[in-house]
Every structure is written in C-alpha cells, then in structure tokens.
Amino acid sequence: MPGQRNGVAPALNDAVLDELSASLGPAGERVLSQIIHLFLDAVPKTMAGIRMAAEARDPRGLARSAHRLRGDAATIGATPLESLCAEAELHGWAEDLSAARDLIDPIAAELTRVETALRARKDAAA
C-alpha cells in the first residue's frame, strides 16, 4: 500500500486533508485547524460511548458510536481508523457484541496514532 512504513499504513492520508483544506478556499488552513480541533475534542466522548455501549451490552449503541467515529475519521483522512470503526459498526448492527468488543482496543490504539499525527500536523502548520 502506498505510504506504508514498515508494513503499517499511515494514520492519516495527508491528501485527504490537503484536498479538504483546498476545497475550503483562502481560509482553508484555518478552517482545517478548527476541524482538527473539533475532532480532537470530540473523540474522547465518542470513544467513551463505544466503551459504555459495550459494557452495557448494547450492540446498537456501539454501532451508533462507531458510525459517528467512522464519519469523523473519514472526514480527516484517518483511513485505518475508519476501516476499524466500519467493522465494529457492522458487528454492532448484526448484534455480534463479542466481535464488536474485540475491536475496541484496536480502535483506541489507532485513535492514539491519529491524535498524534493530527497534533504533529497542527504544530507544523503553526
């Protein structure tokens, strides 16, 4: 896969972020910075929703939270995170709570990679 380092896909597809910034016109980088800030602020609550739904044995709640995080991940080009969330969402809608729960730790780990990459991008733009 293009952009892979040591067999691991990058947390972010920079082309998605660059395209988003360009599509926002002259204020693109400023607006993109705000989008990144909103993402970083929202993910703890969304991840908590995924965990709480799993603890409550609520596969549909888990699917809804995974869907929300999947959409946010797609917006910022976090393709590996998006894929994990899509898989968790499908398991949730299928009411396969065990399979959905198995994805929580990988989602959290990938989310950490995404947060690190976003903060690095924000710092580089500052």
Image (cartoon, rainbow, N blue to C red):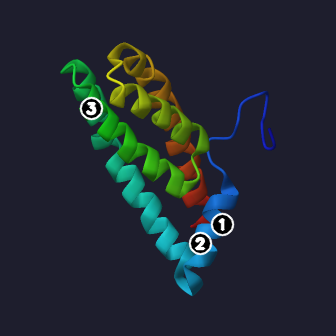
* Nearer-N-terminus badge (2/3): 2
Local secondary structure at mark 3: helix
Which residue in the protein does label 1 denote? 18
* Residue that extends furthest to the bottom in the rendered view of this protein: 26
Nearer to us: label 1 or label 3: 3
| Quadrant of the rendered image containing residue 39 | bottom left
Please tell me the numbered disc located at residue 21. 2
Position in image of residue 23 (x %, y %): 59, 77
Position in image of residue 103 (x %, y %): 45, 22
Count neighbours of disc 1 (C-alpha within 10 A) and say few if under 14, some if 14 to 19, many if 20 or more. some
- The quarter of the picture where the N terminus appears is top right
| CB contact under 8 Å: marks 2 and 1 | yes
Is residue 106 placed above or below 45 in the rendered structure? Answer: above
Local secondary structure at mark 2: helix
* Residue plotted at (29% across, 26% down): 51
- The quarter of the picture where the C terminus appears is bottom right
Local secondary structure at mark 1: helix
Count neighbours of disc 3 (C-alpha within 10 A) and say few if under 14, some if 14 to 19, many if 20 or more. many
What's under tag 3, amino acid-wise?
Arg
Q: 15 or 86: nearer the eye?
A: 86
Is residue 87 placed above or below 65 in the rendered structure? Answer: above
Which residue in the protein does label 3 denote? 60
* Nearer-N-terminus badge (1/3): 1
Residue 2 located left or right of residue 62: right
Q: CA distance from mark 2 to mark 1?
A: 5 Å
What's under tag 1, amino acid-wise?
Asp
* Residue plotted at (27% across, 42% down): 45
